[in-house]
Image (cartoon, rainbow, N blue to C red):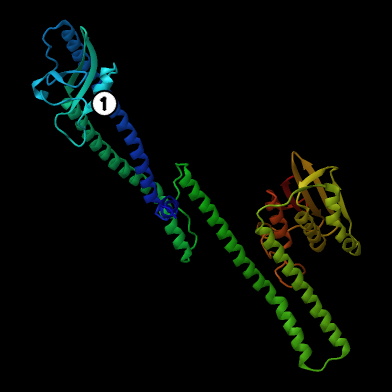
Amino acid sequence: MTLAGRLPAWFGRLPVVTRLVLAVAVTMSLVLTGAAGLVYWRVQTALDRQLDDDLAAYQHGLDRALRAGSALPPGPSGSLHQVLDTHGRILGSSEAVEHRALLTPAELGAAAHGHAVRRDVGSLLPITPDTLRLQAKRVRVGEATRVVVAAVRRGHRDEALRELLAQLALASGLTLIAASYVGYRTARAALRPVERYRNAAATLADGAQNLRLDVPADRDDEITRLGHTLNRMLDRLEASAEREHQFIADASHELRTPLSLLRAEVDVALHRPRSAEELTETLRSVDAEVQRLIALSNALLDLEELGSTDHLTRAPVWLADLVDTAVAPHLRTAEKAGRDLAADTDDTTVDVDARWLVPAIGNLVDNALRHGRGTVRLTATVHEGRLRLRVTDQGPGFPAEFLPRAFDRFARAEASRTSDGSGLGLAFAQAVAAAHGGTAHAENCGGEAAVTLDLPC
């Protein structure tokens, strides 16, 4: 695998701060290199233009003097000249290059054929002595053809460019170091809350309770939004743990009584021989307790499932059909008790989760039949997008001390835990209303007990 193929994996294993600093350093290097290159090019262009102007003026003066037959003029400081015939013989030159040909045979031939020849002698880096820029042109002197070479020294120009390169390198280096340092400090400051969140998560993993992240309230950036998200996750984890603890506590507390009764019935049956009638009665009692255990377990499991459901599955349903489905199982019970069960509904559809709302309504009706008196009336109305379900009976109402805890799990108006019901009916109805985004309310109204569910539909 090539280096280019290995680089992403190697880069991805680095710490986040290191990756950010490297990214800043590489980006700044490219920017600084581009800026330095632009500055160098602009300065070099300006110096070369000045140098070329001096060279062209010197070349023009040599050509004119040679055609006029007068003495060749002195050029700029450090300038050189050389006059050659078409065979390369030096006919005149500056003292500094008296016996040294400035042109190669190929350049001489090109100039003799009328082509302008221009080139630099020596290099900028590494430093070389006698750096020149020369230009050669053909000149007609009477019937003869001459090649005039004009040259100017590039020393000042090269020295200025070398100084510029040094300054640009120093400035770019210092800027890169400063940018990398600022990038490092910025990355550390930006990721410091993440490190705090990690430490807090480690504390939570070690068993800390009621832990929440310290998220600034005056900011709204990616890190603070992460903190709020983690806090919401912690809220849900804590709520889930509380539900689990409550489920275990409720189950152990409520299952103890029927299990104890079952054990007592079995012990009595095994204590001495029993007649067939006595064994039958014992089995009936055991069956009743088993049914109670099954109903209690189902109620607890329904509450737990409803509490852990992220969202309901709403669907349009005809309100009258919804109420009829919820009331139908209780009609026979009401008939046996000699009581009336009436339902009044609006002629409309509602968008609810019938899977949960039907048993919730059924629990309210069952409570009214079990603990109330007289006619049980269920009214279901829709107003301004909200469904209002109200169940009333003509009994004595709720005890005043019971109303504040009416929707608590296993709350009963009677003190005895051996009474009918599990104490979960109202708690389940409230949980269904809350899952729909609504509320549940219990009250005494004119000597009647009334329970109301109000939820968006």
Which percent across, then down, holds residue 181? 30, 44
Residue to which mark 1 is pinned: 106
Residue drawn at x 18%, y 21% as measured from the top left: 151
Counting the numbered discs, the total is 1
Q: Nearer the viewer, residue 59 or 442?
A: 59
The reply to whether residue 189 is visible in this rendering is no
Q: In which quadrant of the rendered view does residue 349 lie?
A: top right
99 relative position to 356: left or right: left
333 or 447: nearer the viewer: 333
Q: Amino acid at mark 1?
A: Ala
Quarter assignment of residue 360 = bottom right
Examine the image and state in which quarter residue 173 appears.
Answer: top left
Query: Is the residue marked by circle 1 packed among few (<14), some (14-19), or many (20+) residues within 10 Å?
Result: few
* Relative image position of residue 85 (x, y in whole percent): 19, 17
In the rendered view, tell whether residue 162 sits above or below residue 334. Answer: above
Q: Position of residue 255 (x, y in %)?
A: 69, 74
User: Can the viewer see residue 68?
Assistant: yes
Q: In the displayed structure, does residue 394 sit left or right of residue 37?
A: right
In the image, 361 versus 43, the foreground residue is: 43
